[in-house]
DNA sequence: AAGTTTGTTCTGTGTTTTATGAACAAAATA
DNA sequence: TATTTTGTTCATAAAACACAGAACAAACTT
């Protein structure tokens, strides 16, 4: 696999973005590589060479990305190499995971509210308000997703 | 300030949650303390004592939380102490920040799509689809927020 | 059977993070 | 003026993180 300078540049951009979202550098670059690669896939060795990482770094990075459900691999008949690529799905699942973090927070808010006394009712009301908003999102986001899918169907039809 | 065991327990839960969302431990605990404290506020010394942190740790944690716009403080007439508390606002602003990260990602997707060739049109379509969904959310979330606020107004009225 | 390919695992290491403690400083108080 | 209160700053220690390198291992080829 031969990468252009432009591809290399975008890999770095994606890497930084993923780093900022809490991923370790090597993982971010790998995701970037799989995103810009011509065929949207890469073998272990291609990753090692194009990202100048050690084999051990790539090995553990790949297992991590697989446990995080971000990548998968296939093999080709007559070959032992693994071809890694980004897992489809996922924006829908990712979004729901995001919502879930919100849900988790609203559970925490419930616990907090359960033990708060009434020395600062204004603050309590504020917490309740946040919790209610979380709940609201919880309900509405799936509807929003449906709306999008519906719209997509129509776009496709015409 | 005297905390109950239950309060201490919830502070830890909140601390862990915030840690998982990328905050350093001390910061998460401080937010927790401000959330469960009877008056929803605490002085520098109260934070030091109740969380068993050093003064320096608390000092830098507090300035950090302030630059992140998560807390603020007031003073009371005739006292030099600062009373720290959580900043209201903010779920609306926080949510928009989240959306913004999505926007950033869709910009990256544009760059990627701009340089991808046609060796894997299926993958390209997939990327386009994700980008479109991001754009869709971008449009719809503010509407959703409005809807919530409207609903709140009605709830309050009756 | 010996060598090659395709990785994995283990150990070490430089870096970054997170917090501590001591010294310092400004304002209030005695 | 000396002391206390209320912090801040700086140097550094301890732990966690992220990666490299070498040894190892399984499957395949020659």
Image (cartoon, coloured by chain):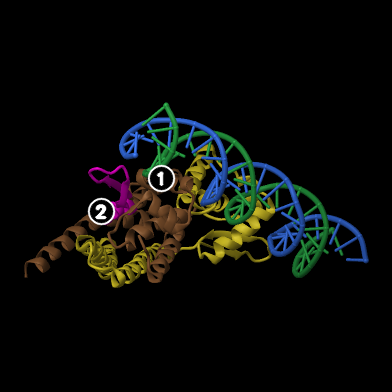
Chain colours: A brown, B yellow, C green, D blue
Residue B29 is left or right of residue B109, and the answer is right
Q: Is mark 1 on a helix, strand or loop?
A: helix
The residue under label 2 is: A88
Q: Quadrant of residue C24?
A: bottom right
Residue A72 shown in magenta? yes
Residue at 24% x, 46% y is A76
Residue A131 visible: yes
Nearest the viewer among A76 and B112 is A76
Residue A109 shown in magenta? no
* Callout 2 and callout 1 share a chain: yes
The residue under label 1 is: A64
Q: What element carries label 2?
A: loop
Residue at 48% x, 45% y is A56
Residue A59 is left or right of residue C22, and the answer is left
The range drawn in magenta is A71-99
Q: Are marks 2 and 1 in contact (CB under 8 Å)?
A: no
User: What's the chain of the residue with tag 1?
Assistant: A
Residue A30 marker: none
């Amino acid at each position: 696999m031969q990468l252009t300078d432009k591809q290399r540049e975008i890999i770095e951009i994606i890497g930084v973005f993923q780093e900022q979202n809490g991923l370790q550098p090597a993982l971010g670059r790998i995701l970037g590589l799989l995103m810009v690669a011509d065929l949207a896939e890469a073998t272990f060795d291609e990753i090692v060479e194009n990202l100048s990482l050690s084999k051990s770094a790539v090995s553990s990075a790949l297992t991590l990305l697989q446990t995080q459900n971000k990548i998968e691999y296939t093999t080709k008949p007559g070959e032992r190499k693994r071809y890694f690529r980004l897992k489809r799905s996922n924006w829908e699942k990712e979004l729901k995971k995001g919502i879930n973090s919100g849900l988790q927070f609203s559970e925490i808010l419930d616990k907090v509210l359960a033990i708060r006394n009434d020395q600062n009712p204004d603050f309590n009301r504020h917490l309740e308000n946040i919790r209610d908003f979380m709940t609201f999102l919880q309900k509405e986001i799936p509807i929003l997703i449906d709306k999008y899918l519906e719209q997509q169907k129509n776009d496709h039809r015409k």
